[in-house]
Image (cartoon, coloured by chain):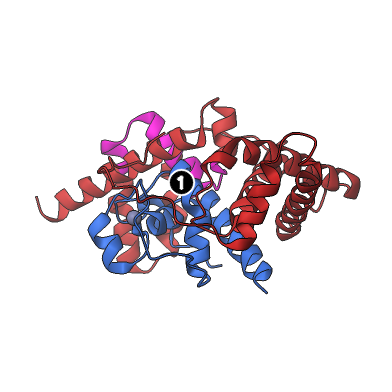
């Protein structure tokens, strides 16, 4: 999956040397099977701490999760993060500290699981016409912002496809998390974001034409 | 964190921006740079969408734009920044 904009080819510099701590992690984790068990266990413990940290940040959204289940969620997130990380280990170039690199896998897995849990019983309704409900926001806004919102609403009506409207409304108005939406639509987060990005680009272009036809 | 106004949420960030996959790919180095743990000279990420502007800012602007436009990646970025900040003590 590429960026949402076409990227020019960038020169890739040769990998810089790893810092000592990162080097120790990589050395331990790339030992032959059996010999690396201690390091893998240490990494798993680190990922578990990161996953618990993430879930603790979301305790409001997760307040109905029983404590045992919450810790189960953390363990699953650490397990999945470990698998994903070990698969990516050969690509670790040392552009960051190893622990920062590793933690992002646990945070991603824990976030996705937490958002899924929080939304499991909530219906995701996709309504391409829901943008008409911008009215309360227009009423609450100051005159300048109200004018802008009216122009955006008109642009949504005129230049977006029904699918683009659904995605835009779900994410930008109804706060549906992008990965929950991707699950329901059986696609990927990257693909949903691409649709959102294209919709926003169309809106901006349309608004720019209005101002400067 | 304050919610951006509805209009900004609908229109999203100024382009160009990275996608979710590249955002994840370069999140750790972006965060370490924010924390002042830049291990090496600033270099462009291989997926850079605005090389000249990023070089000038010494910061990935496509990444910053994506974090403005994508609530999920923004949450993960905030967490990683908090956790990595704590780890560096
Ligand atoms: Zn994203
Ligand atoms: Zn860049």
* x, y percent for residue A65: 83, 47
Q: Which residues are magenta?
A: A156-178
A207 in relation to A159, above or below: below
Q: Indicate yes or no whether the magenta region holds residue A96.
A: no
Looking at the image, residue A78 lies above or below residue B7: above
Work out whether residue A110 can be spotted: no
Ligand 2 falls in quadrant: bottom left
Residue at 22% x, 50% y: name it.
Answer: A207
Whole-percent x, y for residue A77 in the image: 73, 42
- Disc 1 C-beta below 8 A from ligand 1: no
Q: Nearer the viewer, residue B56 or A146?
A: B56
The blue-coloured chain is labelled B
Q: Name the residue: 30% across, 42% down.
A: A5
Q: Which quadrant of the figure has residue A179?
A: top right
Residue A210 horizontal/vertical position (percent): 16, 51
Q: Residue at x 53, y 58 (%)?
A: A96
Q: Position of residue B62 (x, y in %)?
A: 35, 54
Q: Quadrant of the N terminus of chain A?
A: top left
The chain letter under disc 1 is A
Which element type, helix, strand or loop, lies under badge 1? helix
Residue at x 23% of width, y 59% of height: B52
- Image colour assigned to chain A: red
Q: Is residue B84 left or right of residue A173?
A: right
Residue B11 as seen in the image, left or right of residue A115? left
- Residue B16 visible: yes
Q: Is residue A163 magenta?
A: yes
């Amino acid at each position: 999956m590429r960026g949402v904009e076409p990227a020019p080819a960038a020169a890739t510099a040769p990998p810089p040397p790893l810092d000592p701590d990162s080097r120790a992690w990589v050395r331990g984790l790339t030992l032959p099977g059996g010999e690396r068990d201690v390091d893998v266990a240490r990494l798993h413990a680190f990922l578990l701490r990161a996953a618990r940290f993430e879930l603790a940040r979301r305790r409001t959204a997760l307040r109905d999760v029983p404590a045992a289940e919450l810790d189960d969620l953390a363990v699953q997130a650490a397990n999945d993060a470990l698998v994903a990380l070990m698969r990516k280990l050969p690509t670790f170039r040392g552009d960051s500290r190893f622990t920062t690199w590793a933690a992002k896998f646990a945070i991603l897995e824990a976030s996705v699981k937490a958002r899924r849990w929080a939304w499991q019983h909530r219906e995701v309704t996709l309504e391409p016409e829901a943008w008409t409900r911008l009215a309360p926001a227009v009423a609450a806004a100051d005159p300048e912002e109200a004018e802008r919102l009216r122009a955006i609403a008109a642009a949504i009506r005129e230049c977006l496809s029904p699918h683009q409207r659904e995605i835009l409304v779900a994410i930008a108005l109804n706060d549906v998390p992008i990965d929950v939406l991707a699950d329901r639509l059986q696609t990927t987060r990257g693909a949903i974001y691409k649709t959102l990005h294209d919709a926003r680009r169309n809106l901006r272009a349309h608004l720019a034409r209005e101002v400067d036809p | 964190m304050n919610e951006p106004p509805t209009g900004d949420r609908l229109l999203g960030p100024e382009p160009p921006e990275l996608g979710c996959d590249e955002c994840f790919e370069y999140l750790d180095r972006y965060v370490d740079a924010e924390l002042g743990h830049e291990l090496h000279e600033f270099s462009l990420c291989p997926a850079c969408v605005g090389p000249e502007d990023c070089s000038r800012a010494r910061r990935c602007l496509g990444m910053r734009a994506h974090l403005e436009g994508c609530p999920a990646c923004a949450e993960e970025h905030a967490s990683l920044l908090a956790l990595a900040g704590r780890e560096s003590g």
